[in-house]
Amino acid sequence: MLKKIGVIGGGYIGGVLAQEIAHRRLAREIGVSDPAPMPNPSDPEDRQTVVKKQSVSIGKCLDIAEGLPVVSRDTKLVGSKDYSALAGAEMVINTAGVPRKARPDGTFPSREELLAINLKVTVEVAKGIKQYCPDAMIISIANPLDAIVFTLDKRLSPPKNRLMGMAGVLDSARYCYFVAEAANVSVENVNAIVLGGHGDDMVPVRSSCQIAGIPVAKFLDADTLAKIETRTRKAGGEVVGLLGFGSAFVSPAWAALEMAEAVIFDKRKILPVCVKLEGEYGVKGLFVGVPCILGKNGIEKVVELDLTDEEKAAFAKSAAGVAKTCEEAEAMLKTL
Ligand code: TXD
């Protein structure tokens, strides 16, 4: 159990994180930081005064705190509209940003289009971390995932082992779920991993996908697997389209907590993590999803898989996509 975990962004994912951290007893204290709701300058003065007194983070912390007697948990929760709620956190999970929302014509902005909006947010988040918990382990969720982690690295320059992005655990869980569903077996029997960027060119690694240690090809034909892998790549958009508001929020929160628990309990668990590569997989200086051993020091080691030539090419393409988004981010950061 940690002394304190900070949650940056108290929205859909942040709310699930706070309640799950309390319920799983992962920290004695939880701090949630979120500026919402923000007054609309065009509103009448009295309305703005009302909104300034409201706070999503304080309200959600109070709601969860008032439920603690029911679930017999003694967790302290503190919310703030600034970053002060993060003070003293040993770990922070960053969800700050805006999720993809359907446009009036039903189409959705790409993760990259979110970049401009969420870069500004991330620059503020980095200032908050630097001020209140400069030595915290950082797990970042906000999209575009790879570029946001890249930006946190640029602004904070933390040791490589202490900054990681969550996407691969969720993408791999989606892959596992679809394989289990198609093979009509327990999800517990399926072991699969998705590498690369958290975009439509992510790489489900079929060559290492197994059901009870048996290659998946013994259960599902190539056409079915290709369909599953396409659905995995688009799974985020599928949920966004069905919800009509925001994006998936329970599964991303659970995925981030699998990473957090690997660190908190020093599990030395191998998970797909967006991490700064320094030559591994032929990539240098980019944050890309690869298998890592996660333990008390955060990223303990990057694990290099033997990929097929096709998978290597797909990984290189995905990394090139990450490089492009990060180049855009770097150019934008110069203006922020
Ligand atoms: O696998 C993954 N990594 C993705 C990530 C899976 C699903 C969702 N993905 C992204 O996570 C999504 O595209 C968003 O970028 C984030 C958070 O998703 P969520 O659904 O929680 O979005 P919300 O409900 O809008 O919450 C974001 C909160 C919101 O309450 C804002 O007020 C707050 O972020 N926010 C801030 N908090 C702190 N500091 C600043 N500057 C700030 N700006 C906004």
Image (cartoon, rainbow, N blue to C red):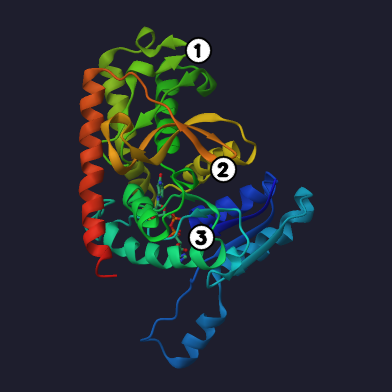
Name the secondary structure under disc 2: helix
Q: Amino acid at mark 1?
A: Ala
Residue identifier under label 3: 8
In this view, the residue in front, 292 or 59, is 292
Where residue 260 sits: x, y (%)?
56, 43
Local secondary structure at mark 1: loop
- Mark 1 or mark 3: name the one nearer the start of the chain: 3
Q: Closest to the observer: 3 or 186?
A: 3
**Residue named by callout 1:** 212
Residue in the image at 40% along x and 36% along y: 168
Give how far apart the Cα atoms at labels 2 and 1 are: 26 Å
- Mark sitting earlier along the chain (2/1): 1
- Within 10 Å of disc 2 (Cα), the crowding (few <14, some 14-19, many 20+) is many
**Circles 2 and 1: CB atoms closer than 8 Å:** no
Q: What residue sits 62% from the left and 35% below the top?
A: 266
- Ligand 1: give its quadrant: bottom left
- Crowd tier of the residue under label 3, counting other residues whose Cα lies within 10 Å: few below 14, some 14–19, many 20 or above: many
